[in-house]
Image: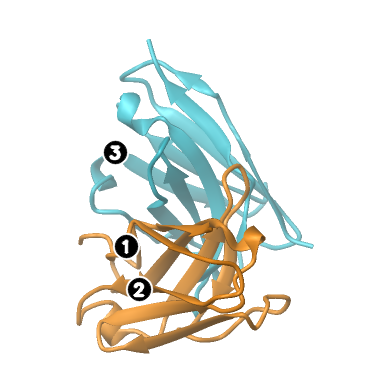
Amino acid sequence: QLLLQESGPGLLQPSETLSLTCNVSGASVGSNSYYWGWIRQPPGKGLEWIGSVYYSGTTYYNPSLKSRVTMSSDKSKKQFSLKLSSVTAADTAIYYCARLAAATIKFDSWGQGTLVTVSS
Amino acid sequence: QSALTQPASVSQSPGQSITISCTGTSSDVGASDYVAWYQHHPGKAPKLLIYEVSYRPSGISNRFSGSKSGNTASLTISGLQAEDEADYYCTSYTDSTTLVLFGGGTKLTVL
């Protein structure tokens, strides 16, 4: 059974860098069948795709966040990560990690989400 | 790219049907068979309902169906039940650099 679990600090100060990790069990982040990505939901707003990373290391980012986002994956550690720099209160959100099937572009498995709050 | 356009909210009575639209452009929804729909209950992980426009994953009720015409995809829920009250999102493949677009989400209220 595939399980995705987000981890990382729940509280950041403005201008800091948000760092989250998604631990994957039941599948390999080294598979060429999937992208591994991040989606967030700010309070009272809709889901926003942040970006995804392919097994090769190729990354795909939401153009609106591209200048601040870095994603990577580590096959040996069975995890992938998100870094979002220079955070502001607007980055306060529930952050989900999810698997995106490459052949059908469907997010077929999601983590439970982790709340990240940006506040001074 | 802009998000795909969905109605902010819809409502319908139990037992009835409802259709939620998802409008994009000829560069995303109109050009792609890779349209998906998700159900999201607050506090839970989103759940895949439909993929490749009209296919249901194993375990998803046949009360949920998807279709597409031109630049607009649609999700139809028949025989509405109280537990269908949730937020619904569409996604579409867009291009090889951006990869995927999300809709703004539709809040479904079952009256």
Q: Which mark is residue A68?
A: 3
Q: Which mark is residue B21?
A: 2
Say which element carries label 2: strand
Q: Do the residues at pointers 1 and 2 share their chain?
A: yes
Q: Could you say where residue A17 lies in the image, as x and y percent from the top left?
A: 39, 26
The reply to whether the C-beta atoms of the residues labelled 3 and 2 are less than 8 Å apart is: no
Q: Do the residues at pointers 3 and 1 share their chain?
A: no
Indicate whether A33 appears above or below A10: below
How far apart, in angstroms, are the residues tagged by discs 1 and 2? 7 Å
Indicate whether B73 appears above or below B85: below
Q: Colour of chain B?
A: orange
Chain depicted in cyan? A
In the picture as drawn, the residue positioned furthest to the top comes out as A120
Q: Residue at x 67, y 46 (%)?
A: A77
**Depth check, front residue: A39 or B105:** B105
Q: Nearer the viewer, mark 3 or mark 1?
A: 1
**Depth check, front residue: B1 or B58:** B58
Q: Please, what is the three-letter code of the amino acid marked with disc 3?
A: Arg
Q: Please, what is the three-letter code of the amino acid marked with disc 2?
A: Ser
Residue A33 visible somewhere in the drawing: no
Q: Please, what is the three-letter code of the amino acid marked with disc 1?
A: Pro
The reply to whether the C-beta atoms of the residues labelled 3 and 1 are less than 8 Å apart is: no
